[in-house]
Image: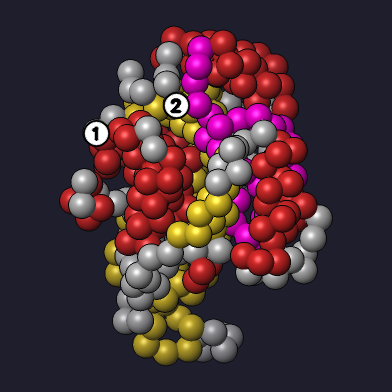
């Protein structure tokens, strides 16, 4: 058992690497000659993998199928020292396959394998039962809007957290964010935040949107971190403190999983130092490290200087 539990949409990331020497003679598009393939943990599992890379242990709870991709996913969890507590379902394991051109290290195509699945009341109860057995100090909700996270589950997790003095951290999509009122912290990007407040034209400037952030924090009673692309992150705490955070950007190769790393590093750092601003600065640094890498990846304590 670890101090941190991740709950959320898990998926398997498959990378197919190959060279492009000519166009397809059947149609004017690139013809990729696959040279090698690899699998990585994606979605909420990438959050868990990043925490495991930093702390050496992590617990992960979610639904999965016992298909070939599900078995590969479970094997990867073991390799990454993730204690995976699976809720078995009939729906295929979510898999995202990316085709990468090896000369320029560019993604050519992504193919998704997924089906809509509505989690049952019984499976909600299984998740809560597992959570109570693990007794974490921190819970991360990683919601990729795969239809499984629901209000009943969130309410039950919030009730458990309230009764046991547990902090909840959330990365969610705009259509689900109201479930998470009164959690410890929520982390949208700027586009998602615009959708959450119903203002798609909100400028990417501190002056234009500071008032909106404060209203959001007061209304939903939580700490708020917003990632702002090249301007990077803003933190507004429950007590109204405002911090604009920046970092020295590396060359960006791939943003896949960067926000998973961001959230994972925040929670890990907070569990060590109990200082939210320092924790968000650590998350900020971690995410800029991983965008300089290819594919879904993790960051190490050495890279962060920890």
Report the magenta residues as a range: 164-193
Q: Which of disc 2 and disc 1 is earlier in sequence?
A: 1
Q: Which residue is at a point 29% across and 51% down the rendered structure image?
A: 299
Q: Is residue 212 a member of the stretch shown in magenta?
A: no
- Residue 237 in view in this figure: yes
Q: Position of residue 138 (x, y in %)?
A: 44, 26
Q: Looking at the picture, tell me which residue is in the foreground, 8 or 300.
A: 300
Local crowd at mark 2 within 10 Å, few (<14), some, or many (≥20)? Answer: many
Q: Which residue is at a point 33% across and 18% down the rendered structure image?
A: 1
Q: Position of residue 170 (x, y in %)?
A: 56, 38
Q: Which residue is mark 2?
A: 138
Q: Is residue 229 left or right of residue 173?
A: left
| 46 to 35, vertically: above or below | above
Quarter holding residue 68? top left
Q: Is residue 195 left or right of residue 5?
A: right
Q: Which residue is at a point 63% across and 15% down the rendered structure image?
A: 159
| 228 to 225, vertically: above or below | below
Q: Are marks 1 and 2 in contact (CB under 8 Å)?
A: no
* Most distant residue in the right direction: 198
Q: Which mark is residue 126?
A: none
Q: Position of residue 77 (x, y in %)?
A: 34, 35
**What's the distance in space between the residues labelled 1 and 2, CA to CA?**
16 Å
Q: Which residue is mark 1?
A: 56
Which of discs 1 and 2 lies nearer the camera? The answer is 2
| 168 to 39, vertically: above or below | above
Q: Position of residue 133 (x, y in %)?
A: 44, 10
Quarter holding residue 158? top right
Local crowd at mark 1 within 10 Å, few (<14), some, or many (≥20)? Answer: few
Q: Looking at the picture, tell me which residue is in the foreground, 79 or 226.
A: 226
Q: Looking at the picture, tell me which residue is in the foreground, 249 or 220.
A: 220
């Amino acid at each position: 058992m670890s101090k941190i539990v991740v709950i959320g949409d898990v998926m398997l990331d498959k990378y197919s690497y190959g060279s492009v020497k000519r166009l397809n003679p059947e149609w004017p598009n690139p013809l990729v000659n696959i040279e090698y393939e690899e699998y990585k943990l994606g979605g909420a599992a990438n959050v868990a993998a990043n925490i495991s890379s930093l702390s050496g242990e992590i617990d992960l709870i979610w639904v999965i199928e016992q298909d070939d991709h599900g078995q590969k996913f479970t094997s990867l969890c073991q390799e990454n020292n993730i204690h995976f507590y699976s809720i078995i379902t009939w729906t295929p394991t979510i898999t995202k396959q990316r085709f990468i051109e090896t000369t320029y290290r560019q993604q050519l195509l992504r193919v998704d394998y997924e089906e809509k699945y509505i989690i049952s009341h019984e499976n909600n109860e299984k998740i809560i039962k597992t959570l109570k057995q693990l007794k974490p100090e921190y819970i991360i909700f990683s919601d990729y809007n795969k239809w499984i996270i629901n209000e009943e589950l969130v309410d039950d997790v919030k009730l458990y957290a309230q009764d046991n003095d547990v902090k909840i951290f959330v990365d969610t999509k705009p259509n689900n964010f109201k479930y998470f009122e009164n959690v410890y912290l929520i982390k949208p990007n700027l586009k998602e935040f615009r959708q959450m407040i119903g203002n798609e034209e909100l400028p990417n400037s501190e002056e234009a949107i500071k008032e909106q952030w404060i209203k959001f924090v007061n209304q939903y009673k939580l700490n708020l971190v917003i990632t702002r692309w090249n301007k990077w992150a803003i933190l507004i705490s429950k007590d109204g403190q405002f911090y604009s955070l920046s970092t020295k950007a590396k060359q960006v190769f791939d943003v896949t999983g960067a926000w998973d790393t961001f959230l994972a590093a925040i929670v890990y750092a907070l569990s060590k130092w109990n200082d939210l601003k320092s924790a968000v600065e650590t998350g900020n640094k971690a995410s800029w490290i991983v965008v300089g890498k290819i594919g879904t990846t993790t960051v190490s304590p050495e890279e962060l200087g920890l």
